[in-house]
Image (tube, rainbow, N blue to C red):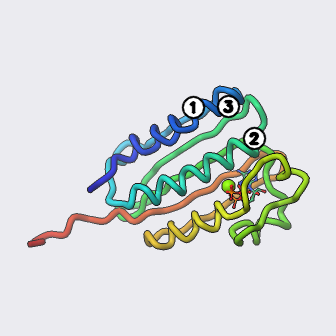
């Protein structure tokens, strides 16, 4: 069945509301006009969103801001992005960030929990959906992760 994109994003924010409140992190949702629903494996895409939002929370200081956005790139492609204004990632680490078990450095990660698998799993899931995932980051400024999903058109004349 198809998933309403705005509802899916609201529900991710809800799942993290306790942590967000504790850390005084604001989450902003922006769904572009015309983005409605989509056929997708909801459990899998929730897994992607949960990882990206949990990363954004982990690596953003108190009182930071996270922006969740959905927009259409064109008629066939939806782009979802998770942006934070946290600590960012050094340039030298960017090429390995989607590798299994890769974490930027032990010092920053020590108290953060996790295994370094989240982004590699997210990439597998997005690929399996026929999409792509990319990460942009500026050290000390923040990070943005974007992934695309194909908008499957209803097939005409389907029996
Ligand atoms: P897990 O997801 O398995 O709980 P993790 O969050 O450390 O562990 P990934 O989600 O794969 O693993 O992320 C890999 C590494 O990339 C992180 O350890 C962190 O160093 C860096 N990273 C990921 N997202 C961000 C972000 N939003 N801001 C800064 N660094 C990030
Ligand atoms: Mg993670």
Binning the other alpha carbons within 10 Å of mark 3 as few (below 14), some (14 to 19) or many (20 upward) gives: many
**Is 140 placed above or below 64 here?**
below
Which residue does the numbered mark 3 point to in the structure image? 25
Which residue does the numbered mark 1 point to in the structure image? 17
Q: Which of the 4 quarters of the picture holds residue 11? A: top left
Foreground mark, 1 or 2? Answer: 1
Element at label 2: loop
The reply to whether the residue tagged 3 has its Cβ within 8 angstroms of ligand 1 is no
Q: Disc 3 vs disc 1: Cβ atoms closer than 8 Å?
A: no
Measure the C-alpha gap from mark 3 to mark 1. Answer: 9 Å
Element at label 3: loop
> Which sits in the foreground, 19 or 56?
19
Measure the C-alpha gap from mark 1 to mark 2. Answer: 15 Å
Which residue does the numbered mark 2 point to in the structure image? 60
Closer to the chain start, of discs 2 and 3, is 3
Binning the other alpha carbons within 10 Å of mark 2 as few (below 14), some (14 to 19) or many (20 upward) gives: many
Q: Pick the quarter of the image with the N terminus.
A: bottom left
Q: Disc 1 vs disc 2: Cβ atoms closer than 8 Å?
A: no
For ligand 1, the image quadrant comes to bottom right
Which residue is depicted at the point 32% across and 59% down?
39
Q: Disc 2 vs disc 3: Cβ atoms closer than 8 Å?
A: yes
The reply to whether the residue tagged 2 has its Cβ within 8 angstroms of ligand 1 is yes
Horizontal side, residue 132 vs residue 34: left or right = right
Element at label 1: helix
Which residue is depicted at the point 78% across and 47% down?
112
Which residue is depicted at the point 75% across and 41% down?
60
Closer to the chain start, of discs 3 and 1, is 1
């Amino acid at each position: 069945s198809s998933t309403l994109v705005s509802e899916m994003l609201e529900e991710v924010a809800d799942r993290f509301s306790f942590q967000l409140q504790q850390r005084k992190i604001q989450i902003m949702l922006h769904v572009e006009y015309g983005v409605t629903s989509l056929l997708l494996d909801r459990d899998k895409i929730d897994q992607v969103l949960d990882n990206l939002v949990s990363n954004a929370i982990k690596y953003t200081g108190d009182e930071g801001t996270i922006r969740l956005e959905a927009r259409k790139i064109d008629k066939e492609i939806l782009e979802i992005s998770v942006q934070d204004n946290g600590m960012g990632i050094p340039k030298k680490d960017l090429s390995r960030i989607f590798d299994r078990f890769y974490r930027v450095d032990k010092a920053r990660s020590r108290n953060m929990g996790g295994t370094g698998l989240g982004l590699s799993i997210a990439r597998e899931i997005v690929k399996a959906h026929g999409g792509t995932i990319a990460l942009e980051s500026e050290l000390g400024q923040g990070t943005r992760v974007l992934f695309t999903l194909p908008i499957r058109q209803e097939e005409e004349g389907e029996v």
